[in-house]
Image (cartoon, helix red, strand yellow):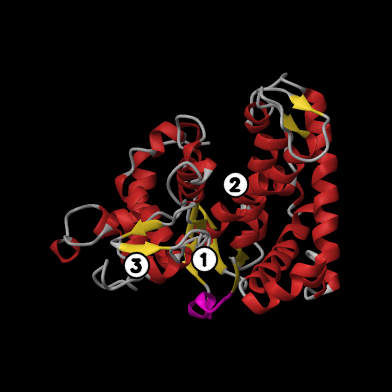
Amino acid sequence: MTAESEKGPVEVSPWYNYTTFDISGDLVFGESFGCLQDGRLRPWIQLTFTAIKAWVYSGAVHQSPALERAALPIGSITVRKSIPKSLLQKEIDNFNLSAAKTGKRIELGSKRTDMMTGVLKAGLTEEKGQSNDSRKTISRAEVHSNVFVLILAGSETSATTLSGITFYTCRDSDILQKLVSEIPSSFTRDGDINFQATATLNYLNAVIEQGLRCYPPFVGALSRLTPPGGATVDGHFVPKGTSLGTDMYSTFHSPCKFHLPDEFSPERWLGRDPRFANDRLDAVQAFSAGPRGCIGKRFVSCNLAYAELRLILAKLLFHFDISPNPGFELWIDQGVFYLWYKPPLLVNLTRRTTIEE
């Protein structure tokens, strides 16, 4: 990134992706993807973004009762035909590549501790499909199905959050100055910046929480089905088999829950500004909640997702002065396919010369 910054404005979003995908690759497959080293995403990773569009098309078809009924006589064939062939092929390519990498990691066994260690804890069975073993072993097919989610959820979501935080902080010079003042004043050299030290930075943590509220990495609702017999939700009876979900973006920007809902104000998380005294901060569940909440938020004691966000932001602002590039304001106008499809986020980076490595 230093070399890029010397050439002119830097598109930082890809660099966030390089970093988070390398971390996820190491945690899941036992090896980095080498994105940071080469300054580019691997073709396997690029396929994930296109494959997501296939998910969106498929999900949209399943939301239509008419299309669902039409598809019943021939299973999923009708549904699949409604999705562009190019997207289906990308989805297949993505699965095949992730399966190959998974096989390589499985061969390592328990020689190292990472996310795959937990997945394989009870043992691996070569049964086809879902394992029915009472010992709770997992089949190779189940591992393949979950790896894609682990990689994507542990990388793109963090990279997206980092991009959103960069946009909102650079847009407000007062917020940026407070953040920049906190980080260099807390560390004298790069080696001091770690998970434990960054966890104590109050303003940095408030900025991250506010970034997750204003620009949640997953846009939409993580739905659940009501159980047999139905369920009562907030005093309303919902029949069995009903898909229920709470849209994250709408909830996080609701004036019923937040004062000045569209304003990026880290102060609302610090408890010092009376304007935000009645904000429902507990409504912000960007990683979902309950047993099916994001594994990255609960993985090991350091709370991986937050630790990663704090560390990357702290190191970036410790080493560089950052400022927006002309045209910066237009970045927030984006399309969404579950995840944000981000335009280039151009910033000016100037290497600090008074720091110790």
Q: CA distance from mark 1 to mark 3?
A: 18 Å
Upstream in sequence: badge 3 or badge 2: 2
Residue at which label 3 appears: 264
Residue at which label 2 appears: 154
Q: Is 60 situated left or right of 182 in this image?
A: right
Residue shown at the point (67%, 24%) measured from the top left? 134
Assess whether mark 3 and mark 1 are in contact (beta carbons under 8 angstroms): no
Label 3, residues with CA under 10 Å away: few <14, some 14-19, many ≥20: many
Q: Amino acid at mark 1?
A: Val
Q: Quadrant of the N terminus?
A: bottom right
Is residue 170 in sight in this rendering? no
In the drawing, what numbered circle is on residue 219?
A: 1
Q: Which residues are magenta?
A: 326-335
Where is residue 168 shown, x and y percent of the image? Answer: 42, 67
Q: CA distance from mark 1 to mark 2?
A: 16 Å
Residue shown at the point (45%, 52%) measured from the top left? 288
Q: Within the image, what quadrant is residue 185 found in?
A: top left
Upstream in sequence: badge 1 or badge 2: 2
Residue 178 lies, with reference to residue 25, above or below; the image says: below
